[in-house]
Image (cartoon, helix red, strand yellow):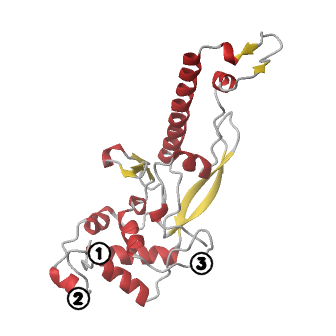
Amino acid sequence: MPTNDARHERDGDLPHSATTTGQRRFRPLRWASRLSCSYRRTIEASEPEVLASKVALSVRRRVLREYRAATPAQARRASEELVRAGFNTSAVPYGYRAHRVRIAPAGRRARWRTRLVIEPVEAATVKMIFTWRGEDRLSIAQIRSRLTAARYPAPLDPATGQPRAWTAAMVRAILRNPKYLGRQVWGRRHHGRPVPEGRWVWSAPWAHTPIVDEATFAAAQHPRQGTHDLTSAGTNPEQAP
């Protein structure tokens, strides 16, 4: 089943999160939509007509500015609630597949949400990548070479569904993705820039089945890599990660 590698996750992209989780689209505020036009419009039969051109320009700008500020904030709160509940709101990481579940909150319309479930073959590959990095202390280039030579299943292209060639960026994205710990996390990046870990939004443990434990994950983040590893891989030590 096609999966996406974590390299394409856009944790800070609020509109994408809202779309992928089936959240309702936020309707424009009543006054914002009313004041954004310059033509005469009848609001309700019991209310007088309001001509936008007669409303002070400063008032119109303030209302529209408040609307634009409120909409992303609402989307962010909705995304945070879904993540804390253990639902996936971004691309499905390599090693998992999406499982759609239907939830029906009391007094609200039923909606579809996404949980992560193990993809066995890919999950075994993820474990091997973490072992090579944390225990064997291999470089990213060495890991990529092993994956390619042994023909480990590569992430699939979300557009075509066809396997792609393993790249250093794919390997690095897998090693840095905390979702393999069995927790959902959101907000690691905002507008393409890294966000301090203390500001990330986390779910409770076991939101989905973990692939690696905390010790294995931590060891892969800062491996004590020796010069002989770089030399054996045929890479320039200054270019190795």
Quarter of the rendering occupied by the N terminus = bottom right
Q: Please name whichever residue, 54 or 93, is drawn nearer the observer in this view of the structure.
A: 54
Q: Residue at x 31, y 76 (%)?
A: 140
Q: Residue at x 66, y 35 (%)?
A: 106
- Circles 3 and 2: CB distance less than 8 Å? no
Q: How many marks?
A: 3
Disc 1 target residue = 133
- Circles 2 and 1: CB distance less than 8 Å? no
Q: Secondary structure at mark 3?
A: loop
Q: Amino acid at mark 2?
A: Ser
* Spot occupied by residue 193 in the image (x, y as percentages of width and height): 37, 51
Disc 2 target residue = 232
State left or right for residue 100 relative to residue 227: right
| Mark with earlier residue (2, 1) | 1
Q: Secondary structure at mark 2?
A: helix
Q: Amino acid at mark 3?
A: Gln
Q: Secondary structure at mark 1?
A: helix
* Spot occupied by residue 36 in the image (x, y as percentages of width and height): 65, 26
Disc 3 target residue = 162
| Mark with earlier residue (3, 2) | 3
Residue 158 vertical placement versus 53 (above, below)? below
* Spot occupied by residue 224 in the image (x, y as percentages of width and height): 18, 72
Marks 3 and 2, Cα distance to the nearest angstrom?
Answer: 32 Å
* Spot occupied by residue 95 in the image (x, y as percentages of width and height): 49, 70
